[in-house]
Image: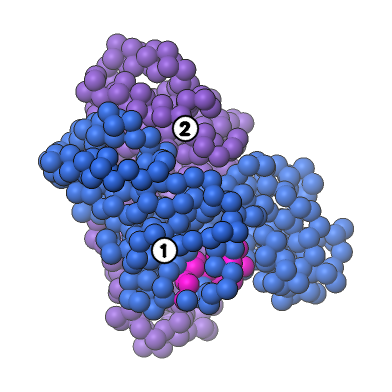
Chain colours: A blue, B purple
């Protein structure tokens, strides 16, 4: 099976993808749009993209492309604790570091550590944590370090000199597995954290204030919303759609009735699937 | 007055900041955290950071830092249409382009144009659109182009060869002005799109399903929510807070009662202010 993921090599998304699809052919993509296009056009079977709190790509793009490509559904969600490590070329010396490279958000997420341990060392933005690690591996003569993940350290043969330098121990990032099928993803090795359903709900242009109505459809049925995010539509200011996660098991009648009720108030509903949430290792 | 903004120079955030604060001293910051720290520590008076749909920094960080620094409030919101242009060094030739540099999301947002007009030209990720423009300006001998904004073209003396190459005409990005004061931002030159209030609402750990209750507090008062976003708390999986925008003018009694009612169901409310939404030029 062919699996696309948001690259580059050794990105956090690849770290997630290798756990979700350990035995499949993986194809890194330059951006989130390319992942969606590869699935849409049948070039790959599935793709793994960040849904929440990633430092690799503005995740709102994932919601926008889910909205724009109704043929693409969600098969699984996976959550991974974020762990940043400081790494150098194995030929280099910890004492000699003159510059630290990483993605600006990874440097921000390691702010307190870097500020106390490497206060006067210059920091340099890179397009990704993986690219920073690659740059360090390719320049052994320079006294530089990278903030990146374990996978990047392994892939590029770097030596980790400080582990878990992120400021918050329990920072997580979320990924989704997308495809044109529904609910075919299975995995017996990963811990299952729960089950949820994903819906995209669009309100008609003339329906300001409709969010109340949309949410009461779920409220009186005691369907528990575990995530809700409103996104402005590209067609103009003020129009929007909502991404909603309903927690718990799938109750066909409840869902069918809720969706009918939403449609009766002129909302458009794209049901993205009912899927499991898996826990990954960092 | 000193104003921090999410840099680098010629970023979209600087383009917004120069319109919001045309006569103040502007200080670019490496990441969103540094903007918050500069305000928190009194190094600057205010800061401008992206709130939604930006390609410069994961905007969920803005919500997370608003949550973590309750002393910081919102003074204004500004919305700007996104316009990407393809630009080269003025000494170079359009026909000779061999490589196009930009932020991966800007390349993705210009996907259809680049794919039809520059199909076989290699694309290279950069940490920001502004850094890509700077790189093109510093390497006149190389046959390279950048996708960046008008401001970057001006600053780095580049020649725009294709204007408005973004795939969607009405793609917008949103920024907020943050400070430790409330509601001091005024601007008579910019068009006002509306008024809104921002609230951060945290639910206690043992209160699963509380989102219903929170939203009904606004629903029965007919307070119109124009944005809602749930964010997972760093303390563990499953706990979250919500960022909510209530549209329209400020009604003190209505707000006071709504906040009291939220606190009675053990929600914690951080009122971020009532502020105007301004329209910027791209």
Q: Is residue B114 visible?
A: no
On the image, which quarter does residue B226 sit in? top left
Query: Do circles 2 and 1 both sit on a common chain?
Result: no
The spot of residue A153 in percent (x, y) is 72, 66
* Of the two numbered discs 2 and 1 in the rendering, the one whose residue sits closer to the viewer: 1
On the image, which quarter does residue A111 sit in? top right
Query: Residue at position x 25%, y 42% from top?
Result: A253
Q: Is residue A218 visible?
A: yes
Residue A156 or residue A121, whichever sits in front:
A156
Query: Residue at position x 55%, y 30% from top?
Result: B69
* Disc 1 target residue: A184
* Disc 2 target residue: B241
Residue B4 or residue A151, whichever sits in front:
A151
Query: Residue at position x 73%, y 45% from top?
Result: A113
Query: Residue at position x 32%, y 54% from top?
Result: A272
Query: Which chain contains the residue that carries disc 1?
Result: A
The magenta region covers: A2-18
């Amino acid at each position: 099976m062919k699996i696309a993921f948001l690259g580059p090599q050794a990105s956090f998304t690849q770290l997630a993808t290798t756990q979700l699809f350990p035995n499949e052919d993986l194809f890194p993509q330059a951006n989130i749009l390319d992942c969606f296009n590869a699935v849409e056009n049948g070039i790959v079977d599935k793709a793994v993209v960040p849904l929440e709190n990633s430092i690799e790509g503005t995740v709102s793009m994932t919601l926008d492309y889910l909205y724009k490509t109704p043929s693409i559904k969600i098969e699984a969600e996976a959550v991974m604790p974020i762990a940043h490590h400081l790494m150098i070329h194995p030929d280099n010396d910890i004492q000699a570091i003159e510059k630290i490279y990483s993605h600006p958000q990874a440097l921000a997420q390691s702010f307190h550590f870097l500020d106390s341990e490497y206060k006067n060392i210059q920091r340099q933005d890179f397009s990704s944590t993986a690219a920073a690690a690659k740059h360090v591996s390719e320049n052994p003569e320079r006294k530089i370090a990278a903030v990146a993940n374990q996978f990047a350290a392994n892939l590029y043969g770097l030596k980790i000199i400080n582990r878990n330098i992120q400021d918050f121990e329990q920072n997580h990032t979320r990924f989704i597995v997308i495809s044109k099928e529904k609910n075919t993803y299975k995995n017996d090795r990963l811990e299952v954290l729960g089950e949820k359903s994903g819906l995209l709900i669009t309100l008609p242009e003339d329906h300001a204030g409709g969010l109340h109505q949309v949410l009461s459809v779920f409220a009186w049925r005691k369907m528990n919303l575990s995530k809700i995010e409103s996104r402005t539509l590209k067609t103009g200011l003020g129009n929007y759609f909502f991404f909603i996660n309903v927690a718990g098991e799938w109750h066909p009648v409840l869902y069918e009735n809720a969706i009918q009720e939403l449609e009766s108030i002129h909302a458009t509903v794209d049901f993205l699937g009912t899927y499991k949430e898996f826990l990954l290792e960092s």
